[in-house]
Image (cartoon, coloured by chain):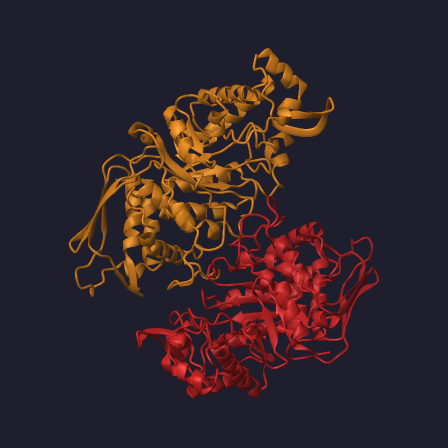
Chain colours: A orange, B red
C-alpha cells in the first residue's frame, strides 16, 4: 500500500543497511544458502498518520533461503520490524551481506517508551535533536519527551506570545521557530516517535515571567515586593486567561494527544510571603495548606487543557501533595522511593510512568549501565490490575551539563538499556547476557554515524567513530 | 627572522582570530581609539627546532593605540604570547574586531605542563590526537604524554618488530604507522608541544607478549605453566636484548630527550609462581623481596635507555618499592596521599611531576572542576630546594571509557583548569574568580571548533558547537 511512513523507511533502511551504493542492492550470486533480494512487507491496516499511545507495534519476521517476510497490523509494527531486520543483516566484505534464517514474533512489553531531552538548561540544535530521534528509533523508543522550556530559558517561539522567546530565550539564536518545531515533529512521525512537549508550571517557569506581566507571584520581604518572583500566581484570573490562550496554541502545534504539564518542585515560600495570596487562601478556605492552592491551580490548568481536548502527563508531586486530578491523568514518577510511590499511585487508579531510576544525566565513573538495566517498573507491591496501570517509562537526560558538544555521546548507548527493559519481556534481565548485545549495538550505532560512547571498558569497534567521515 | 614555527603560527592565528576571510585583515577605519594593523613579534634567540624541558616560554606583550609588540627570548615564548594575543581580540560584529590596550609580562610557573592520553584501552584517530594538541596549545600545555601501548593493545608500529602491532593491536586498522607518528610529532612541534611516549614495563605489557616470544613471565599453577602470563621476565637475558633493540628504535623515532618507562602496578604473584624466577632470586641473593627483582629489572632498563642517550620518566612505584634509580630520573606521582609522597621523593632528591589529583577520567555528576583547580603541586611539607624539584604536573585522561566519540568533550575544558594551575602564579587560586574565565574559555574553544562541554551548569555560548559547521 502507499504510505509515506513506509516509503521513507524503505529508502532510509536501504542506506542504513547497504550504505550509499546502488550496486550492492543487486543480486549477489555467491551466497551459499540462497540469495535474498527483497524483504516482503505486509501491513494489514491502513497507514496511520501519527503515532499514538497504544499503537500496535507488534510484528512477525520470517527469514529463510526462500524469502523474507515481515507482517504487521500497522505501519508502526512494520517500522519496528524493519529496524530488527536491518540489525540482522551483517556486512561481511565490501559487497557481501549476510543474514541468518530466523522467525521472530515480537511486540513491546510497555506502550510508552520515552526519552527526555531538556532544551532549556542548554539549547540543543535541531540537527542534534533529529540525530537523537534517529538513534531512538534504533532502540525502538516511541516517545520524545521534549522538556522544551524551564526557569533558565524559553526557546519555544509562540505564535500568540512571541515575546516569550524574544525575552525568555538565552538569545535570538537559541530558539525553536514554528517551522523547526514542525520539522522535528515530522521527523519523529516518520520514525514512529511521538513528540510530547512539557510546559512545566506553576514552578520552573521563571523564563515565562520575563515577558508575561504579572504571571509570576511577587515574593515579599518585610511587607514589600523584594524583586524576586515565585511560581505562577494562582490567585489571579489573568493567569488562567493567559494559560487558556497559551495551551490552545500548544494543542494545535503539537499533534500528540498528550501534553506534559509538569507540576514538580513547587516551592511554597514565595506564595507564603505574598499578602494577596494569603488573602486568596482565606477566601478559598484553604487554611495554611498550600498544597490545596497547588491543587486549585493544577485543577484549573487540567480543565483548561481538557477543554482543548488534550490528555496530560504530570510529575508525581501533584498527586503526592494530595491534589485530586482527573482520572485519565498520567503520573510520572521521578523521585527516589519509587517502589512505594508506584504502589500508591496505581492503588489510587492513575496510569503511571517510571523515570526515577533512569536519570542518564547522573554520571559516574565506570560501568554504570547495569543499574539502569536492572530497574524494573513492575518491581513494586500491587495487584495485576495495578501493574497494568504502569504504561511504561522514560529515561531522562537533563540539560544542566550537556549541550551539542556531548549530549549524543552521553545519552547513547546508555539509553538503549532502558529501551530494552521497556520493550523486551520481563525475564530478559541478565546484565551479563546483555553486555555483548550492548557492545554490538554501540558499534552498530557508530557504523551508522552516531558518537555512541564506550560503556564496557577497554575494547574497540571494527569501524570507529570519525568526526570527519560519518557514514 | 625566518622560522617555520613562527610562520606557521602567524598563518594559524590569522585564521583563528579573523576566520577564513582575507578581507577582514585589511585596515578597519571605524575603530575609535586607533587601528591595529599588525602585531610586531620580536624573538631574541634563533629558531629552535624542537621544544624541550626548560625551554624559555616567557614573553612580554604590549598593546596600545600606537601598536602591538610581542617580545620573547625564544620562539616558544612567541607562541605563548600569540595565543594570549588571540584571546584578547574580540569579534564585535561581522567585520569589527577590537582589542584593549594592555601590558603583559608572562611566564610559566612550572616547566612541565602535560596531558596524558591513552591509546591502548581505546584507539584514538590521528585527527582526534591532532585536535587535542591544538586544544592543548590554547591552554599553554607543553607536553603530550602519549600512553601509547598497554595490556589491552599495542598500536605502535615498530620498524624492528612489526609483529608487535600486527599481533598486539586490536586489529589492522587500530595502529599508528611511523608516518602517522611523525605527523603527530611534527604537528605538536609546531605548537611547541613535546611528545613523550610511554612504553610501560615490566607490567602493563600483555600486548607485547602476543608477538615477542618468551618476553613475558609464564605463570605457574601446581608446578606447571597455566597459560597465563605476568610482567616481563626479568630473569632472562633475552628480555634485555629485546629491550635494547626496541628502545634504540624508540630513541630515534621520538625526538624528545625523555621517554616514559612506566614501572607502575607490577603484580608479583606470577613472578612468585615461576620456578625459574625463584631460582634467579636465589642466585641474585634477593631472598623473597620481589621489589629487589623489580629494581634489578628497572635498573637494567634505565641503563639501556641511558645508553641511547635518553632521559626517563617513571611512575612512583619504582621508587616506592625501594628501587634506586639514576639521579636524573623524573618520578611521576599518581597515587592518593601525594602530599607525603612528594615530600619523600623530593627529599630523596628526585625531580617529580604530580598527576594524582588530576585524573580527568574520574567523572562525577555536577561541577567537578574546582577539585582539580584547587590542587597545588607545592602543597606538601618540604624545603625550598625540595619544592624546586617539582617540575610540573600532568592531567590524565585514561582510555577505559573514552574514544573518538567523547574524548575531546570529556577532556575539554576541564583540562584547562589544570593548565592554569601549572602556568599561573601560585596565588591565582580563587575558583570563584576562575569560573567566568573558564566559561569564556569554553565558549572560545567552541568558536574555534572544539566540542568543549558545559562545566558550570546551565548557560549558553553566543556561538554553540555544531557538528555540521565547525569554524
Left or right position of B463 against B127? right
Which quadrant of the figure contains the C terminus of chain B? bottom right
Does A181 sit above or below residue B398? Answer: above
How many tags in the picture?
A: 0
Is residue B252 at all visible to an observer of this figure?
A: no
**Residue B454 in picture, x, y percent from top left:** 58, 50
Does B82 sit above or below residue B303? Answer: above
Please give the name of the residue rendered at 25% of the width and 35% of the height, measured from the top-left corner.
A45
In the figure, residue B111 lies in which quadrant?
Answer: bottom right
In the figure, residue A72 lies in which quadrant?
Answer: top left
Please give the name of the residue rendered at 36% of the width and 40% of the height, measured from the top-left corner.
A376
Does B167 sit above or below residue B404? Answer: below
Which quadrant of the figure contains the N terminus of chain B? bottom right
Left or right position of A38 against B19? left
**Residue A193 in picture, x, y percent from top left:** 38, 40
Left or right position of B443 against A413? right
**The furthest residue to the front:** B287
- Residue A471 or A401: which is nearer the viewer? A401
- Residue B146 or A121: which is nearer the viewer? B146
Is residue B41 at all visible to an observer of this figure?
A: yes
Left or right position of A48 against A115? left
**Residue A262 in picture, x, y percent from top left:** 50, 31
In the figure, residue B279 lies in which quadrant?
Answer: bottom left
- Residue B18 or A343: which is nearer the viewer? A343
**The furthest residue to the left:** A66
Does A459 sit above or below residue B239? Answer: above
**Residue A124 in picture, x, y percent from top left:** 53, 45
- Residue B157 or B298: which is nearer the viewer? B298
Amino acid at each position: 500500500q502507499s504510505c509515506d511512513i513506509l516509503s521513507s523507511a524503505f529508502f532510509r533502511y536501504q542506506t542504513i543497511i547497504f550504505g550509499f551504493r546502488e550496486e550492492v542492492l543487486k543480486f549477489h550470486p555467491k551466497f551459499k544458502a540462497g540469495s535474498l533480494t527483497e524483504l516482503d512487507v505486509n501491513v494489514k491496516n491502513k497507514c496511520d498518520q501519527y503515532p499514538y499511545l497504544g499503537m500496535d507495534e507488534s510484528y512477525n519476521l520470517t527469514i529463510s533461503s526462500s524469502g523474507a517476510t515481515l507482517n504487521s497490523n500497522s505501519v508502526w509494527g512494520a517500522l519496528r520490524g524493519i529496524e530488527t531486520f536491518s540489525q540482522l543483516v551483517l556486512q561481511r566484505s565490501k559487497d557481501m551481506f549476510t543474514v541468518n534464517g530466523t522467525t521472530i514474533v515480537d511486540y513491546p512489553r510497555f506502550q510508552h517508551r520515552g526519552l527526555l531531552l531538556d532544551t532549556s538548561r542548554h539549547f540543543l540544535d535541531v540537527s542534534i535533536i533529529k540525530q537523537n530521534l534517529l538513534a531512538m528509533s534504533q532502540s525502538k523508543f516511541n516517545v520524545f519527551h521534549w522538556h522544551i522550556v524551564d526557569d533558565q530559558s524559553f526557546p519555544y517561539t509562540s505564535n500568540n506570545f512571541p515575546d516569550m522567546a524574544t525575552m525568555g530565550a538565552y538569545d535570538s539564536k537559541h530558539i525553536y521557530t514554528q517551522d523547526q518545531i514542525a520539522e522535528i515533529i515530522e521527523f519523529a512521525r516518520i520514525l514512529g516517535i511521538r513528540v510530547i512537549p512539557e510546559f512545566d508550571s506553576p514552578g520552573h517557569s521563571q523564563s515565562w515571567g520575563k515577558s508575561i506581566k504579572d504571571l509570576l507571584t511577587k515574593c515579599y520581604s518585610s511587607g514589600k515586593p523584594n524583586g524576586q518572583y515565585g511560581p505562577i500566581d494562582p490567585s489571579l484570573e489573568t493567569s488562567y486567561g493567559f494559560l487558556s490562550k497559551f495551551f490552545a496554541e500548544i494543542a494545535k502545534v503539537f499533534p500528540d494527544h498528550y501534553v506534559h504539564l509538569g507540576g514538580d518542585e513547587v516551592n511554597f515560600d514565595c506564595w507564603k510571603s505574598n499578602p494577596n495570596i494569603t488573602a486568596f487562601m482565606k477566601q478559598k478556605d484553604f487554611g495554611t495548606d498550600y498544597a490545596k492552592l497547588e491543587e486549585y491551580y493544577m485543577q484549573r490548568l487540567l480543565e483548561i487543557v481538557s477543554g482543548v481536548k488534550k490528555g496530560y502527563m504530570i510529575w508525581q508531586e501533584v498527586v503526592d501533595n494530595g491534589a485530586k486530578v482527573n482520572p485519565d491523568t498520567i503520573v510520572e514518577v521521578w523521585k527516589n522511593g519509587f517502589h512505594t510511590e508506584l504502589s500508591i499511585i496505581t492503588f489510587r487508579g492513575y496510569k503511571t510512568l517510571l523515570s526515577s531510576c533512569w536519570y542518564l544525566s547522573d554520571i559516574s565513573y565506570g560501568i554504570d549501565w547495569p543499574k539502569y538495566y536492572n530497574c524494573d517498573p513492575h518491581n513494586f507491591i500491587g495487584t495485576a490490575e495495578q501493574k497494568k496501570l504502569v504504561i511504561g517509562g522514560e529515561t531522562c537526560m537533563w540539560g544542566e551539563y550537556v549541550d551539542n558538544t556531548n549530549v549524543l555521546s552521553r545519552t547513547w548507548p546508555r539509553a538503549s538499556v532502558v529501551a530494552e527493559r521497556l520493550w523486551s519481556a520481563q525475564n530478559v534481565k541478565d546484565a551479563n547476557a546483555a553486555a555483548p548485545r550492548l557492545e554490538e549495538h554501540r558499534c552498530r550505532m557508530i557504523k551508522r554515524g552516531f558518537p555512541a560512547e564506550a560503556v564496557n571498558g577497554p575494547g574497540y569497534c571494527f569501524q570507529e567513530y570519525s568526526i570527519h567521515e560519518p557514514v
